[in-house]
Image (cartoon, rainbow, N blue to C red):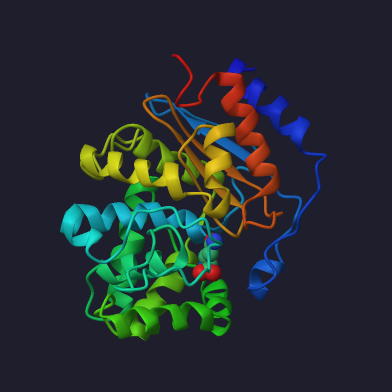
């Protein structure tokens, strides 16, 4: 067996017995997820994807979409126009917090829901469908294959998404969100409902790790400067109110999602994707986080290790 695959496989089997946490309950379709699904994938600079466990099982991307849609917004509008609408300070608050600057109503950062909704608003489109198409096409370029939306998860998100709607109305009242709330929020729910596998998110993360170049098909998806900006924001804000401890322990810019996906970027080395639906109180995957922590230690991937 390939030595890297056997290492990934032994990491996976060591972490598998841990069964703390449960799938997200606040979106009914996500609560139905099989809690025991478990996968890990990595991609290196030459585009070889290595994966173990349930690596072909699809799940919804959820908040793992946020850094990638942010990258699209940066590439379309430039840094200053994006920063006029959304900040880049860690909020130290949960993903669904009402973290808006008191004077301006600008959301704290693009990786909490408020900031992600403002970012989705920056993606052009005459209506929710056109905006969704642009987003899905962009996410597909990061993954290197055509991705699709799980419409039943979308409907479940939309039915239970009043908190996100409320955040959008607040931002619109401040003038931070210029677009119509329903058009933006429904596109955001579909963005969260895009189906991916652990292999897909490893390749997506690899595209950030290798300066905006998809390592599998070599397409330059976003400019290098955009990849650097996004990875910086993932470093400080990617794990919500666990971002500081995560940086210290694991040392990898990362982003989690409530369906159990987790991406980590080892700059110029690896893109990593993990999947396990059991979540901790921060909404981060329990086994995914432990797996990536051990992987980082095993491969010496901490960004502040002496390489
Ligand atoms: N769709 C979810 C929400 O907006 C995404 C949150 C997440 O993955 N943390 O509530």
Residue that sits furthest to the front in the current view: 103
Query: Where residue 207 sits: x, y (%)?
Result: 35, 39
Question: Does residue 130 appear in this view?
Answer: yes
In the figure, 231 relative to 27: above or below?
Answer: above
Q: What residue lies at 69% left-to-right and 58% top-to-bottom?
A: 281
In the figure, 58 relative to 97: above or below?
Answer: above
Quarter of the rendering occupied by the N terminus: top right
Question: Does residue 51 appear in this view?
Answer: no
The answer to which quarter of the image holds residue 175 is bottom left
Quarter of the rendering occupied by the C terminus: top left
Query: Where residue 250 sits: x, y (%)?
Result: 56, 32
Query: Where residue 17 sits: x, y (%)?
Result: 83, 39
The answer to which of 269 and 116 lies nearer the viewer is: 116
Residue 199 located left or right of residue 78: right
In the figure, 162 relative to 220: above or below?
Answer: below
Query: Where residue 70 sits: x, y (%)?
Result: 32, 56
Q: What residue lies at 58% left-to-right and 40% top-to-bottom?
A: 245
Q: What residue lies at 62% left-to-right and 58% top-to-bottom?
A: 283
Q: How many marks?
A: 0
The answer to which of 249 and 74 lies nearer the viewer is: 249
The answer to which of 2 and 80 lies nearer the viewer is: 80
Q: What residue lies at 35% left-to-right and 84% top-to-bottom?
A: 181
The answer to which quarter of the image holds residue 86 is bottom left
């Amino acid at each position: 067996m390939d030595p890297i695959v056997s290492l990934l496989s032994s990491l996976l089997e060591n972490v598998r017995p841990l069964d703390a946490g449960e799938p997200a309950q606040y979106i009914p379709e996500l609560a139905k997820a099989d809690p025991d699904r478990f996968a890990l994938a990595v991609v290196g600079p030459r585009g070889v994807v290595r994966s173990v466990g349930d690596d072909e099982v699809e799940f919804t991307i959820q908040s793992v979409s946020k850094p990638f849609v942010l990258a699209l917004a940066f590439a379309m509008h430039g840094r200053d126009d994006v920063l006029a609408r959304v900040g880049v300070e860690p909020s130290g608050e949960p993903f669904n917090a009402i973290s808006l600057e008191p004077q301006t109503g600008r959301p704290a950062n693009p990786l909490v829901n408020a900031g992600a909704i403002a970012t989705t608003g920056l993606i052009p489109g005459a209506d929710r469908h056109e905006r969704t198409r642009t987003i899905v096409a962009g996410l597909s370029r990061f993954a290197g294959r055509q991705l699709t939306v799980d419409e039943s998860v979308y409907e479940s998100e939309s039915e239970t998404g009043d908190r996100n709607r409320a955040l959008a109305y607040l931002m619109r009242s401040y003038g931070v969100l210029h677009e119509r709330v329903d058009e933006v929020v429904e596109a955001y729910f579909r963005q969260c409902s895009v189906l991916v596998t652990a292999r897909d998110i490893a390749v997506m993360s690899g595209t950030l790790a290798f300066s905006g170049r998809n390592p599998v098909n070599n397409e330059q998806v976003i400019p290098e400067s955009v990849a650097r900006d996004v990875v910086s924001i993932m470093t400080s804000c990617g794990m919500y109110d666990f971002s500081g401890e995560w940086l210290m322990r694991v040392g990898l810019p990362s982003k989690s999602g409530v369906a159990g996906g987790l991406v980590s970027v080892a700059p110029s080395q690896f893109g990593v994707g993990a999947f396990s639906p059991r979540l901790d109180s921060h909404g981060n995957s329990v086994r995914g986080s432990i797996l990536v922590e051990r992987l980082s230690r095993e491969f010496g991937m901490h960004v502040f290790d002496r390489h």
